[in-house]
Image (cartoon, rainbow, N blue to C red):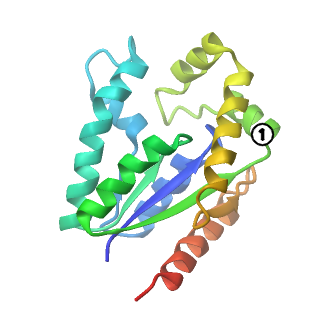
Amino acid sequence: MTRLILLNGLPGVGKSTIARRYAAEHPGTLLCDIDSLRTFIGGWRDDFEGSGALIRPAALGMITGYLRDSGDVVLPQLLSRVTELEKFERAVLEAGADLVEVVLAADTDDAVRRFHRRDDGTDSWHTIVRSLVAEAGGDEVLRGYAERLAALIRRRPATRMVTSVEGEVDATYAAVVAAIDAAASTRPQ
């Protein structure tokens, strides 16, 4: 059975980095990075949030089709609202696949620091996201994400937690793979 592997967590904790590596080391796995996809929408730099709203339904369709017809999907995405997560759950059910939820966890203060330091040039949207967060209230916006994510996790007992330690990509990646494998081994046959 195919799987949607949701790598959830605060901005800057390494979701995209881990997802890229997972896809690279698991041939046939689709990396569906919605933040990257939004850069394919004309005018995305001028309306980052609007382009995200436009691409999300397309991403859901792509995920559903890939799960149904091709293979696993890894999705690095902060989903802190249950209504958003449920959209992806419906896609998984429609495709007859499994959902594996892994949260890359970090202390909130550490995650905030990492958010401000990230920008290795890999992802063109980091500067824009930092500006949007600053305009919306700065670090308190990130702390709000942390609170909503913690509340969501409490409602979802099957969620696997992996500590994301800055600079420890190999260890974090190994822990994520172990969490994914553990989820597969506990699935009812």
Tell me where residue 183 appears, x and y as whole percent: 53, 76
Tell me: 22 left or right of 92. right
Tell me where residue 96 appears, x and y as whole percent: 27, 69
Please tell me whether residue 15 is drawn above or below residue 156 in the rendered image.
above
Residue at position x 64%, y 34% from top?
145
Front residue of this view, candidates 23 and 151: 151
Report which residue position mark 1 lands on: 108
Residue at position x 38%, y 56% from top?
89
Specify the quadrant that holds the C terminus: bottom left
Please tell me whether residue 125 is drawn above or below residue 58 in the rendered image.
above
Point out the residue furthest to the bottom here: 189
What amino acid is labelled 1 in the image? Thr
* Marker count (numbered): 1
Residue at position x 45%, y 48% from top?
85
Tell me where residue 148 appears, x and y as whole percent: 64, 39
Circle 1: is it few (<14), some (14-19), or many (20+) Cα within 10 Å? some
Q: Secondary structure at mark 1?
A: helix
Please tell me whether residue 116 is drawn above or below residue 158 in the rendered image.
above
Specify the quadrant that holds the N terminus: bottom left
Residue at position x 41%, y 49% from top?
86
Tell me: 171 left or right of 178. right
Please tell me whether residue 5 is drawn above or below residue 128 in the rendered image.
below
Tell me where residue 75 appears, x and y as whole percent: 43, 52
